[in-house]
Amino acid sequence: MENQQSQNRISRRQFLQIASITAAGAALAACAVPALPAAPDAAAGAASAAPGAEVQPVRIAVGGWAEQGTKDLLTNTGFTEKTGFPFEVMLRTDTKETELARMASAVQAGNVPYDVLDFEDELATSFSQAGYMRGLDDLLPADFWAEFPDAMVENHKIWSTYNGELFRVLHNWEMPYWYYRKDWFDEKGVEVPKTWDDVRALGPVFTDEANGVYAQTEGMIKGAFLNVYLAWITLQAGGSPFDVGPEYETSLQYIHDLLHDDKVLNPASLQKDYNQQNADYVADKVAFMRQWPFFYDVARSEDNKAWFDESKVQIALPPAGPGGANMLTYAAGWGHGIVKTTPNMAGAEALFKHLIDSETAVEAVKTSYWFLSARKPVLEASEGKGVAGPLKMYSDAGALGVRPFHPRFVEALTVIEDTASAYLTDQITLEQSLAQATDGLAKLG
Amino acid sequence: MAVSTQVSTQNNRVRRRIASAGSRRLLLFVALIAPVFLLRFATAAYPILQTIRLSFTNQDLIARTNDFIGLQNYRTMLTDSSVTGALSFTLIYVIATTILDLVVGLMIALLLNTVFFGRTFVRTINLIPWAIPTIVAGYMFRWLLDDQFGLIPYLYQLVTGDRMVVFINAWSARTAVILVQVWKDAPFIAVVLLAGLQGVGQDLYEAARVDGANALQRFWRITIPLVTPLLVTMGLFRIIWTVASFDLVYGLTFGGPGVATTVLALRIFQQGILFFKFGYASAIAVVLLLLVGVIGVLGLWLFRRTDVAY
């Protein structure tokens, strides 16, 4: 008996051997790269799930500002009742930098944080080229594009298509508007500027440097803010910053003049983001500015109730540059796409089809202006309320150009911002700035 | 003969026992070391080796390339003004913040080492800047330095009558980034140095006083030599932490205006995370690693030379 016990007992040596082998095995297993999950059969959906099997909710990631609107939309339009898929609205990160990092690491690890994503232009180029998004052409109904104006169709071709494959459908279509203080213009007896030269003349009218009041302010800090402004101005000059052509040169010179010679644009704009820009406006420090539609709501928010008056937040067409009256501004957008490696492809496809459906799109704009676009039934349903009015005004005026594009957009905008910012703060000359931009963009291929 | 054989057998047994005990000890050593070794290998050595390997490739998730290209990334770096510019500001940033951190930290520590009413409370609130996350401090100071609403420009205007616009030229932007970093980190340095100061015996000061040494002499001849090992250690840590950080720059200036406040770590983030150029980003990271390595060796050498005893 004793002998048998000693045979069953593990010796210290054996124990140490087993322990070290187990530890090594566990560590190696943890280090091993998990295999990418195979995309499930797209045809398999909630309906074909085994009886009694739990249907996985389809996860959609949206910005914090769109969370409630998206929940309301999917509830009001009966997504779950129609498709059998429950849904989960998740928050994505607010900036492209953090979302790029999150998605890149998740995909490398064979994981995905969500099934459907609501994403902007900047991410669109990176995600599609990295192969993270699923092609969507086969999910579109016949005559889908008939409801879209030419400008939106063109935008989809440039910003939402890669290698001939569509990977994003816009639900949000917005452009920078030109906001101005009508009360100040009336008081000074000056007209709303129609051209760049008119703008130059407004420096002496409105700017009072001692009190920090300027004719114009912008959000121009690096990290995509400056690029948006440069693209907007260069479009007005008739070109694209990424071409580094004469139009871009004219634009840079013009902005430099506004900052340093004409005393129109607050030089501190170079270090402001949109929140700081808006704060300047509602603090009565600015006569006019370019800003995205969200300022329309910011100005009317509870925080600014005491300050707000319709005459303080009027919207007009932007002043025309050398490019003429048809290139006053551009539209950008947010849209839905499907992550290629989602484990719930059937649910993702069902949700995507539901979201792009014409009836859903109409219901969406009634839920939130986040879903406003120039899609014809959507624009009609919005009845010109809120920012739909200015959207219609800009669309009717034919003021829309195409947003300047570069195939490696995120890299290209960094090159442009670095070189332009250095010139606008007098660290280098205009010639040096252009040469560095040309060289930097050439390296991108 | 028989006795000789018996002795030989016993010797062999003893040798086997010793050998067996030795191998057991070796096995025990390996077993105890293995988990830590594997952990360090997986979390430190492997990433470093992988980064070095990647630096010799053109791995790019967008271009979908992943070929061995030798030293091409390093050659590109030499002519890439965005990297050489970032390297120069990184050196300025690291040296300036480290020196100022130590000087200001020592001044705060000396102050906190004196006896005054409410000392415990002051020592506690001293740590508040250090406790604020760096990225939060970056955004906070963007507003504190805002030309329209910033407290600092407002106070400046009260005193001088002029408006202060910080971030529109390279010099003032760089100064702002360095000073904010010092504001944030000097309190922590102060607490560490305070612990060192409290270990300095009062009898040394009393003896020096009896010998006629004035306050400045006591500071230079007693305080400084005795806290020098701590200063070197903290300086070393500060350098290594600062070289690898970019969160303050990210929140405060995003490297602007131009590339005036761009640091190498921000370039690695841009190349790797924003542009998905893992090969090139790894090459910059290797340069940063070498920089930290050289500084580390230098620091250790200095540390060994600063052993002071009284």
Image (tube, coloured by chain):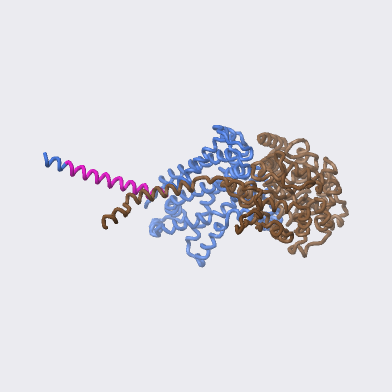
Chain colours: A brown, B blue
Q: Is residue B200 left or right of residue A321?
A: left
B33 in the magenta segment: yes
Q: Main secondary structure of the magenta part?
A: helix
- In the rendered image, residue B11, in percent from the top left (x then y), is placed at 19, 43
Q: Please indicate, yes or no, whether residue B209 appears anywhere in the rendered image.
A: no
Direction bottom: furthest residue: B117
Q: In the rendered image, which quarter is residue B16 located in?
A: top left
Which of these two is toward me, B185 or A292?
A: A292
Task: Identify which residue, A4 or A146, lies in the foreground.
Answer: A4
Query: Residue visible at 81% across and 61% down?
Result: A309
In magenta stretch: residue A200: no
Judge whether residue B199 can be spotted in this image: yes
Rendered view: B286 above or below A4:
above
The residue at 85%/44% (across/down) is A325
At horizontal 58% and vertical 38% (from top left) the residue drawn is B59
B51 relative to A317, above or below: above
Picture coordinates of residue B81, whole percent (x, y): 62, 37
Viewer-side residue, A123 vs A366: A366
Label tally: 0
**In the image, residue B207 lies at what x, y percent?**
38, 57
A357 displayed left or right of B224: right
Residues rendered magenta in the picture: B8-35
* Image vertical order of residue B92 relative to residue B206, above or below: above
Q: Nearer the viewer, residue A356 or B236?
A: A356
